[in-house]
Amino acid sequence: MRKVLFLIFISFLFSSCHLRNLTGSGEITFKKSFYAQRISGGSYGSDEVVNAYLVKETEHLAVYVENGYSISDYALVRIYQDFENYYTDMINIYGDHTDLDGNSKVIILLMKLNQTTSTTTSSVLGYFRPSDLIYGKGNNGEILYMDIEKSNLDPNKMVGTILHEFQHLINYNLNKDNIDVWLNEALSESATILYNDNTIIDRMTEFNKLEGYYSFYTWNLPSDWNGESSGDSTTQQSIFSSYPSSAMFMYWLYIKSNYNKNIFKDIVNVKYLDSYSRIHSIATKYGIVSYSWDDLLLKWIVDVDHGVVKKDDKNKAYVNTYKKNATVLYPGAILIVQGKKSYQIGGKTPNIYYKEYEGYKYTTGSTMMYNRENNNKEDRTALVNKDTSLSTDNTGVKLTIPNSIF
């Protein structure tokens, strides 16, 4: 099985065999055993028993540490204080969680998650297992599995991960698997945006390193999405361009709503709509956009290009230009290229119908979106596949860009 790179804050939906809680109940005891998975070289291992001891219990939280390891006082305080500080607000915005084990608490298990690390595989900071919330499976409780070594090394970053995963835990109670992965991840990104400035800056830094290809709702991009071989490390790293793109999109919504966190609560509450309509309808409610989904994508990328998406004068998001000759433009993906010369989609030059928007020209009725002409900087063209999903007939389109455009 090909190993894949994991960026921080990644959570996956796991299926597991039928297991009982090893302690037989949800009682908070000094010693406790859990079924958990470790990661080696980017791959999850099978379930194993992890024995742990209790280090802190608060009103809504119980923190366990794997036997043989310890947590620093500073890291422990940051974890439980921030969790308690934001717990009530997160419940108000994202909804309530289950209490399958009857202890009225969320358990954080600090364990050695990463068995091996290298320069080509990023460490996993933590995960949540939905199987724990299905009676008769997993550990039968509300549990977040976090890396003990990373917790000691960077508690601030770990807090952001915990809040990200806590949203996933809440979301599973509300939606089970009936939510698109990209929206679930976007909501988790919004949680870290609200409560962890360190995460905003980290995601902004990651976003600014992207090479002109932005996507947040075609979540699992194929390995050859940028026209290169799947074995190329740059290709593999770019697979997870979705995370920073998602974070900056949700941060943009937050900024455009005048920093009103209720915009995320409203997105959560319109469950009767599909994911795209949920975002678009709430963006319309807050006066951010009034037309179509592609209009929303356009305004987002234009505002990023204008420097609107920023934390402060030193930390702001910006777009880069794509430097390769070919790629596959998947649904929802945006490609920024330099210049306004000819290019081809699917081997053909498309007919383009331009429309003006804030100094930009953009197209309607095709996969193209806008072309910027600015005397003060080089022209740029943004190409967007406006489809909302990968269908059976594969809506990803091959894009060829002549060398002359650079």
Image: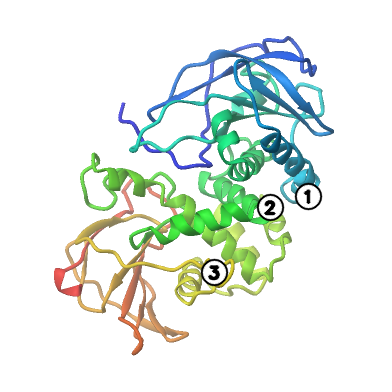
Of the two numbered discs 3 and 1 on the same chain, state the one appearing first in sequence.
1
The image shows residue 264 at horizontal and vertical percentages of 68, 57
| Amino acid type, callout 1 | Asp
Q: Taking 238 as reference, is 119 above or below it?
A: above
Q: Give the CA separation, mark 3 to mark 1.
A: 24 Å
* Label 3: element kind: loop
Q: In this image, 233 relative to 71: left or right?
A: left
Q: Residue at x 57, y 57 (%)?
A: 200
Residue on which disc 2 sits: 195
Q: Residue at x 82, y 32 (%)?
A: 58
The image shows residue 143 at horizontal and vertical percentages of 67, 27
Mark yes or no: residue 273 visible: no
In which quadrant is the N terminus drawn?
A: top left
Q: Quadrant of residue 153?
A: top right
Assess whether mark 1 and mark 3 are in contact (beta carbons under 8 angstroms): no
Which numbered tag is attached to residue 89? 1
Assess whether mark 1 and mark 2 are in contact (beta carbons under 8 angstroms): yes
Q: Quadrant of residue 71?
A: top right
Between residue 279 and residue 310, name the one nearer to us. Answer: 310
Residues packed near mark 2 inside 10 Å, few (<14), some (14 to 19) or many (20 plus): many
Between residue 84 and residue 386, name the one nearer to us. Answer: 84
| Amino acid type, callout 2 | Tyr
Q: Taking 20 as reference, is 176 above or below it?
A: below
| Amino acid type, callout 3 | Val
